[in-house]
């Protein structure tokens, strides 16, 4: 801690910049400067990330979406759009509404990706409604990602800590990956002219913060955590007798995104 | 004098030059961190990891808005992010200084905001996760005019604050709930 203090005293502004950029490894707090003197320390949301060197090869994360808790408010979609300035009409994460009637017809809609929430019930369904539920979707962070396989320039890749990311400086925008993704998680960003998709907020996770959609979810329908930590919520859920499934298991992609309470109608 | 294998020498020379140029070009054009972890630029990972944060946490608002934070933190709405209702931290504060105004919803916008999460008409809202209401029945049951906005009775940051206080005064709250100041 002593050398950190020395670094602060040397050049406060530079220090703060470094911390914000995350380049001082091992600092226990995310320190935010306060105008003039002093600073505030943002407590970590994922225990065990800060305070030590981040070893990429030793990390394992999982994301769990609890269908039985989602209320379809669209907080996640709003936060995601703000965090990444996602252009209108494109979605890194979105929330679908499934409605099932007594004849087992399934109606799916997703107005504006769920960005405005679901303010009104659907009135165009002829039969009697049996069940309504919301299904949040995002990148599945596959163990065997088909998007990585098809990229001709090595611009999309799987990191040693299990995140599938995009190298925006190298992407040529050929859109092969967009076609290859079985979950339609990718899109061509009209601003950068490159492929784009959900990153599980890699920059936040590396600073010990939860992905922004998880952080803003008021219903705790989205959960993210460290699988190496047996005390984390995701470890406990995955070890419990709950019904946990992934989307399209037959595709052989082995997603790291799990769904709790998923109905078989969901594709 | 031209020997009979000059053309072979030329081809070999040409191939050697091409191989050298190719090798040189690959050296120059391949980014230094390519292949560090796999068939991609290792530096791209750090670039993504250093993307500037736009959202912080509710705690980040505490230092300047201790009053609102305190109410929110101990109220029923503690699971909602300040930034969902108001906008991201980065639009508001930079380097510890106030740089821009965050929007504050007023009037009917507040009603739209509340109904977004609390509308009973949307059936898929599990009771143990969130309590929902039907409009205008909710207002009718309180015997008020239908143009009342939610925040006339509910504190937006801690929706049961006033209501529990009123109940406490009327002696309707007992036990644990009465102890926590009607939050």
Image: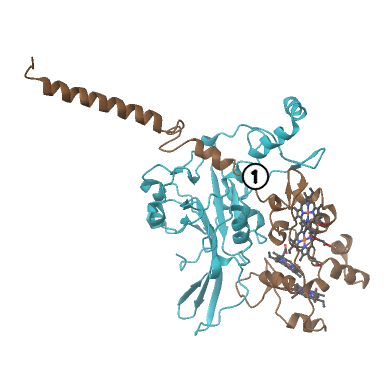
Q: Which chain does the brown colour mark?
A: B
Kindly identify which residue carries mark 1: A46
Percent from the top left, x then y, of residue A42? 73, 44
Q: Residue at x 27, y 27 (%)?
A: B19
In the displayed structure, A187 sits above or below A40; it is below
B174 or B183: nearer the viewer? B183
A161 or A113: nearer the viewer? A113
Q: Which corner quadrant of the image does residue B67 belong to?
A: bottom right
Percent from the top left, x then y, of residue A71? 62, 67
Q: Secondary structure at mark 1?
A: loop
Query: Could one spot residue A252 in this view of the protein?
Result: no
Q: Residue at x 63, y 34 (%)?
A: A23
In the displayed structure, A125 sits above or below B96; it is below
Q: Residue at x 74, y 29 (%)?
A: A11
Q: Colour scheme of this structure image?
A: by chain
Chain A painted colour: cyan
């Amino acid at each position: 801690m002593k050398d950190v203090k020395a670094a602060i005293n040397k050049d406060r502004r530079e220090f703060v910049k470094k911390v914000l950029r995350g380049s001082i490894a091992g600092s226990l707090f995310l320190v935010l400067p306060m105008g003039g003197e002093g600073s505030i320390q943002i407590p970590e949301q994922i225990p065990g990330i800060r305070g030590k060197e981040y070893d990429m090869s030793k990390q394992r994360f999982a994301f769990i979406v609890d269908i039985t808790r989602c209320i379809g408010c669209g907080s996640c979609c709003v936060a995601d759009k703000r965090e990444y300035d996602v252009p209108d009409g494109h979605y890194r994460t979105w929330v679908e509404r499934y409605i099932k009637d007594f004849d087992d017809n399934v109606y799916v809609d997703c107005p504006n990706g769920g960005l405005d929430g679901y303010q009104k019930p659907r009135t165009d369904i002829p039969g009697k409604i049996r069940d309504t539920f919301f299904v949040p979707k995002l990148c599945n962070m596959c163990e065997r990602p088909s998007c990585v396989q098809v990229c001709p320039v090595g611009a999309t890749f799987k990191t040693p800590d299990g995140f599938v990311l995009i190298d925006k400086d190298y992407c040529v925008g050929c859109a092969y990956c967009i076609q290859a993704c079985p979950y339609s998680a990718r899109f061509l960003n009209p601003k950068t002219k490159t492929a784009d998709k959900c990153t599980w907020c890699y920059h936040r996770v590396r600073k010990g913060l939860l992905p922004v959609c998880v952080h803003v979810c008021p219903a705790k329908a989205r959960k993210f955590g460290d699988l190496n930590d047996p005390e984390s919520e995701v470890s406990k859920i995955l070890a419990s007798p709950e019904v946990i499934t992934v989307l399209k298991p037959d595709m052989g992609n082995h997603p790291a995104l799990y769904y709790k309470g998923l109905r078989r109608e969901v594709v | 004098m031209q020997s009979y294998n000059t053309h072979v020498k030329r081809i070999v020379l040409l191939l050697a030059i091409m191989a050298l140029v190719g090798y040189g070009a690959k050296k120059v054009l391949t980014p230094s961190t390519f292949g560090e972890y796999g068939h991609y630029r290792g530096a791209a990972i750090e670039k993504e990891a250093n993307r500037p944060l736009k959202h912080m946490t509710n705690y980040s608002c505490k230092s300047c808005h201790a009053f609102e934070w305190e109410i929110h933190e101990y109220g029923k709405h503690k699971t909602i992010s300040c930034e969902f209702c108001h906008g991201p931290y980065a639009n508001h504060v930079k380097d510890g200084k106030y740089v821009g105004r965050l929007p504050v919803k007023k009037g009917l916008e507040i009603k739209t905001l509340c109904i977004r999460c609390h509308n009973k008409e949307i059936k898929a809202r599990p009771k143990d996760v969130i309590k929902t209401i039907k409009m205008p029945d909710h207002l009718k049951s309180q015997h008020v005019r239908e143009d009342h906005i939610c925040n006339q009775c509910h504190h937006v940051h801690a929706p049961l604050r006033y209501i529990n206080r009123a109940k406490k005064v009327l002696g309707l709250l007992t036990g644990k709930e009465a102890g926590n100041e009607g939050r």
